[in-house]
Image: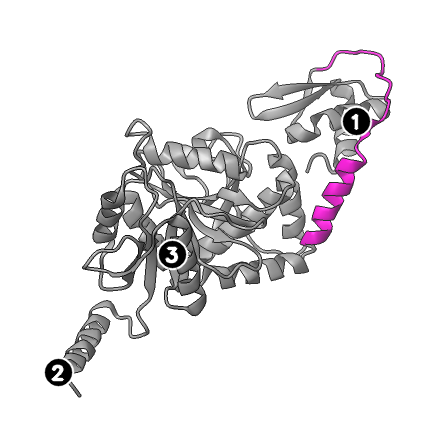
């Protein structure tokens, strides 16, 4: 045995003793083309992330201190990345501007201001489904799987108060009642509930904040660059791993505006979800959700929208004083809710309260109205 081989073996043993990791050392890739801040910014992120636990592999433009693969452009870098992932040469990879298939979205990881709490945003790029509510339900499972891969055995879930939130809440409640186990977070505002307010975003109330990808992308940018004026993302862990029901590649996304601290954090994030096997956990979560009739609930949701009462001609009852509020109605269902009550001879008006959409009815008819809306699945 040569002296070089002996020295390499001794170095591996020393690293294993130091880190407590006696398994095969994982490798995390980083593509180094496409940053708005140039190659040096990405390289500095890789240097900041160097550690004895996992190795970093550069793809695109290399550097002498790292294992490197040269590529002439981003397309070639992505092909090399995909090949290395599929062969198991790298366990995960951090890149920019990658096109995921429909059904795969990324779970971002931010650090909330002032309190420094970590929170996952599910999701931040990609399209989980072309149906908004279904996408957010799937995003919930992606977020839970990611949190579990990071070591959170029972992550809490909050739903950002955006369009579709109440419909998402109803589907998740149905799943929960049907055997899919997870925990809702409770808003820290006085009125509580699992639908989160803007304050909860800043406080990091849930472990997983569920949101549509476009809104999640906006949140990511604000959390990452609110101290820098916007052109340099200095905080957080990037847009995160692409997660899907049957997606095997562990590819994490960075913004082109990400600074070296975010690059370093993203590499750490990539190692953690690779070690935690996020893709395998996602499959397990979907198996459990499907047993709880996920597909059936999604199908009912789509049928309900297609058969909406808004397509019917409904005569408005005679007007009366309406001062009783019914909340918990999604903005997408507001017109349906109002017309449904009209159809049942209850005069109602739509409005907007401080926590979201409301239907106003006469106080004497509030109980009846709530029963009608519950039966139709428009409120919980």
Q: Secondary structure at mark 1?
A: helix
Q: Residue furthest left?
A: 3
Q: Secondary structure at mark 3?
A: strand
As measured in the structure, the alpha-carbon distance from the residue carrying label 1 to the one carrying label 2 is 80 Å
Q: Dot 1 surroundings within 10 Å: few (below 14), some, or many (20 or more)?
A: some
Disc number for residue 93: 3
Q: Earlier along the polypeptide chain: callout 1 or callout 2?
A: 2
**Coordinates of residue 133 in the picture (x, y in percent):** 63, 40
Q: Secondary structure at mark 2?
A: helix
User: Magenta residues?
Assistant: 294-322
Count of residue discs: 3
Q: Nearer the viewer, residue 156 or 136?
A: 136
Judge left or right: residue 311 versus residue 245: right
Position of residue 233 relative to residue 249, above or below, is above
Q: Residue furthest front?
A: 72
As measured in the structure, the alpha-carbon distance from the residue carrying label 1 to the one carrying label 3 is 47 Å
Identify the residue position indicated by label 1 in the image.
Answer: 310
CB under 8 Å between callouts 1 and 2?
Answer: no
Q: Earlier along the polypeptide chain: callout 1 or callout 3?
A: 3
Judge left or right: residue 376 versus residue 121: right
Identify the residue position indicated by label 2 in the image.
Answer: 3
């Amino acid at each position: 045995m040569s002296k070089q081989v002996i020295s390499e073996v001794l170095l591996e043993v020393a690293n294993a003793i130091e880190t407590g990791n006696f398994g095969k050392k994982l490798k995390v890739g980083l593509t180094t083309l496409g940053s708005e801040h140039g190659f040096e910014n990405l390289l500095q992120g890789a240097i900041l992330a160097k550690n004895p636990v996992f190795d970093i592999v550069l793809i695109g433009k290399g550097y002498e201190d790292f294992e490197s693969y040269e590529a002439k452009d981003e397309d070639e870098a992505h092909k090399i990345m995909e090949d290395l992932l599929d062969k198991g040469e790298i366990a995960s990879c951090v890149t920019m501007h990658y096109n995921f298939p429909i059904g795969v979205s990324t779970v971002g990881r931010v650090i909330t201001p002032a309190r420094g709490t970590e929170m996952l945003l599910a999701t931040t790029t990609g399209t989980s489904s072309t149906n908004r509510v279904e996408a957010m339900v799937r995003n919930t499972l992606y977020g839970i799987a990611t949190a579990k891969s990071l070591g959170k055995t029972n992550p809490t879930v909050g739903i950002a108060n955006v369009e579709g939130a109440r419909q998402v809440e109803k589907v998740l409640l149905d799943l929960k009642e049907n055997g899919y186990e997870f925990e809702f977070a409770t808003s820290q505002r006085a009125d509580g509930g699992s639908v989160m307010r803007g304050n909860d975003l800043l406080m990091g109330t849930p472990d997983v904040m569920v949101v549509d990808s476009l809104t999640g992308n906006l949140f990511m940018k604000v959390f990452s660059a609110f101290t820098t004026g916007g052109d340099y993302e200095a905080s957080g862990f990037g847009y995160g791993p692409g997660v899907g029901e049957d997606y095997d590649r562990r590819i994490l996304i960075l913004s082109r505006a990400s600074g070296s601290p975010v690059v370093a954090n993203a590499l750490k994030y990539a190692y953690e979800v690779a070690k935690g096997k996020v893709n395998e956990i996602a499959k397990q979560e979907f198996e459990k959700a499907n047993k709880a009739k996920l597909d059936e609930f999604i199908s009912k949701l789509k049928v309900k929208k297609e058969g909406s009462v808004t397509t019917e001609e409904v005569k408005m009852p005679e007007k009366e004083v309406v001062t009783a509020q019914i909340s918990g109605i999604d903005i997408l269902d507001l017109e349906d809710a109002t017309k449904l009550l009209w159809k049942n001879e209850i005069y109602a008006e739509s409005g907007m309260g401080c926590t979201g959409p409301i239907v106003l009815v006469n106080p004497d008819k509030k109980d009846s109205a709530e029963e009608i809306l519950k039966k139709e699945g428009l409120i919980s």
